[in-house]
Image: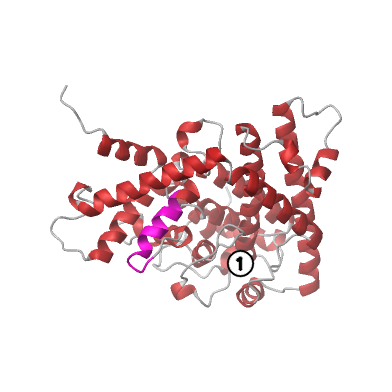
Amino acid sequence: MRTREEIESNENKVLAPYAMHSRDCVGREFAEPLSSNRTCYQRDRDRIVHSEAFRKLEYKTQVFVIFEGDYYRTRLTHTIEVAQIARTIGRNLGLNEDLIEAIALAHDLGHSPFGHAGETALNDIMKEVGLGFDHNFRSFEIVTRLEKRYPQFDGLNLTEDVLVGILKHETDYDHHGPTGRFKDKGPTLEAKVVDIADSLAYLSHDIDDGITSGCITPEDLKESILWQEACRSLPVTVGQDNKEMFKYQIVRALIDRQVSDLLNASEKKLIQLNFLSSQDIKDYNLKYIDNPVINFSDGIKTQRDYLQKLVEEKFYFHYRILGMTAQAQRVIQTLFETYLNNPKQLPYSIYPRDKKFDKKEKHEIICNYIASMTDRMALNEYRKIFEPYQKI
């Protein structure tokens, strides 16, 4: 049986000098004894997987509301895909896969029900009291404050490198909010791998779900060079007449093309910049936010941007998606107004009756409660408002 010390020693043999080695971990806010058989990042990963917020991702959706069907992505399946892609990239670049996995598994914990539609609705409501809703910051709040699993502290007491990776998560879709005490802390290269894997997974699964739903057809994307190249790479036996097989193979080809380009472009930049330690990476990432080390070549990035533009136009603005978005926002707004008008409808654990709260505090309590809901729970609570219990 290998001990933690042996695992850490093995990292020194297999990880690149710019990778985050477990024994160099900054540590946790609250000191704890080290594990005998797990590194600090393995421990973080395990705590995230066992959290309540992680389990709820199964019933929080990306685009399609949960009752639309079992095939479409949920936050959980998206999270697993991000972790898988990120680990593949990290392994090829000699990075710490356990740190990558921990950040990837936690990066979407703070999402509200109904995907970005729910987040937009909560953000608009919270702006009324001078606040807002940012799912990255809420992911951070979950793992540092809202999860209650340990008697010694609130949250999960994760390592600083994982917390910074969660808080400073940046993609084409997400931009980090307030960073507080970590303002001057740069993310690791492992965190930046998760960022790019998230963007890559988004584009690929939007195409998959879009074709499955009929909101996107191959014809809609034919102007994209990246799409054309992926189509040409498919075996001649895979034609568009077999919709299911074509869909699986085109998504596979798109991911493979992007990951291959990403690895080649990133390796060239790593050689050019010649980082000698993980701290060099952190300093660079703090200073050069808009010039990431982990990135696509200019050519592929341009092609990706255009394909993404086509997908957004055809998918996100499809009448079915717009209808679901409007419905989801109505659910969130109605729930919020109902609880705000009568907070005593909230559970005792959420809204203590022996305390007084001002308007802003009430908004924060209600926002956190609704954001913690799954799609199914939010819809059930919404039905209770319009379908009150009747005597049997």
Amino acid at circle 1: Thr
Q: Quadrant of residue 248?
A: top right
Q: Nearer the viewer, residue 221 or 255?
A: 221
Element under label 1? loop
Check disc 1: other Cα within 10 Å, few if <14, some if 14-19, many if 20+: many
For this rendering, which residue is in front, 255 or 142? Answer: 255
Colour convention of the picture: secondary structure
Picture coordinates of residue 30 (x, y %)? Answer: 39, 67
**Residue 196 at x, y = what percent?**
65, 57
- Residue 72: x and y, percent? 56, 35
Image quadrant in which you'd find residue 301: bottom right
Q: Is residue 51 visible in the rendered structure shown here?
A: no
Closest to the observer, 334 or 107 = 334
Q: Is residue 238 above or below residue 299?
A: above
Would residue 129 be counted in the magenta stretch?
Answer: yes
In this view, the residue in front, 293 or 88, is 293
* Residue 69 vertical position relative to residue 151 in the rendered view, above or below: above
Which residue occupies 68% across, 68% down? 292
382 relative position to 191: left or right: left
Q: Most prominent secondary structure in the magenta stretch? A: helix
**Image spot of residue 88 (x, y percent):** 69, 50
Q: Identify the residue shown where x is 22% and y is 33%.
A: 388
237 magenta-colored: no
Could you tell me if residue 140 is visible in this image? yes
Magenta region: 118-131
Q: What residue occupies the far top of the structure in this picture?
A: 392
Q: How many numbered circles does the render carry? A: 1
Task: Give the position of the C terminus as an image quadrant.
Answer: top left
Residue 303 as seen in the image, left or right of residue 156: right
Residue name at image x 28 percent, y 65 percent:
360
Q: Dot 1 corresponds to which residue? A: 188
Q: Is residue 222 left or right of residue 322?
A: right
